[in-house]
Image (cartoon, rainbow, N blue to C red):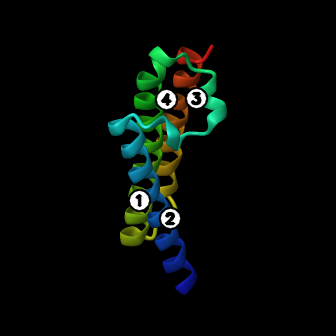
Amino acid sequence: MPGTVIGIGVTGIVGVILIVLGHLIRRSENHRLLHDYHIDRVPPENRNAFCALSGTGILVIGVSLVLTAVIFGFTGSSGSFLCFALGFAAGLILLIIAGRKYRR
């Protein structure tokens, strides 16, 4: 039981961190929060759009982690992993689209 509580807590905390990070990248379009490798390959005129789409992808992954922790905390069902898998896939797709669309 304590291991489950720790796992739920860590999952929720990581989710909240990703939500905050995604929000900061998306709203403030602060490209300094992303790795230099990604930003150096994006033309300056596309950096704001790249940050908005990348931030949204990170935000989606964070929300799916928090929802997974909440669902597992209330139900104890391992089916909550489905929420994480779908959210992670959606966020990853957004990150890949951002990379392919805006990088040279």
Residue 86 visible from this viewpoint? yes
Q: In which quarter of the view is residue 53 placed?
A: top left
Mark 1 in CB contact with mark 3 (< 8 angstroms):
no
Closer to the chain start, of discs 4 and 2, is: 2
Q: Quadrant of the C terminus?
A: top right
Q: Is residue 41 left or right of residue 8?
A: right
Pointer 2 and pointer 3: residues touching (CB < 8 Å)?
no
Q: Which residue is mark 2?
A: 11
Please state which of the two labelled residues, at mark 1 or mark 2, is closer to the viewer. 1
Q: Residues within 10 Å of mark 4 (few under 14, many from 20)?
A: some
Label 4: which residue?
A: 94
Which one is nearer the viewer's eye here, 60 or 75? 60
State the CA–CA distance, disc 4 to disc 3.
16 Å
Rounded to the nearest whole Å, what is the CA distance between mark 4 and mark 2? 21 Å
- Name the residue at the right extreme: 37
Name the residue type under label 3.
Ile
Label for residue 39? 3
Please tell me whether mark 4 or mark 3 is closer to you in this view: 3
Q: CA distance from mark 1 to mark 3?
A: 24 Å
Say which amino acid is labelled 1.
Val
Any part of residue 1 in sight: no
Earlier-in-chain disc, 1 versus 2 = 2
Q: Residue at x 39, y 53 (%)?
A: 20
What is the x, y in percent for residue 42?
57, 20
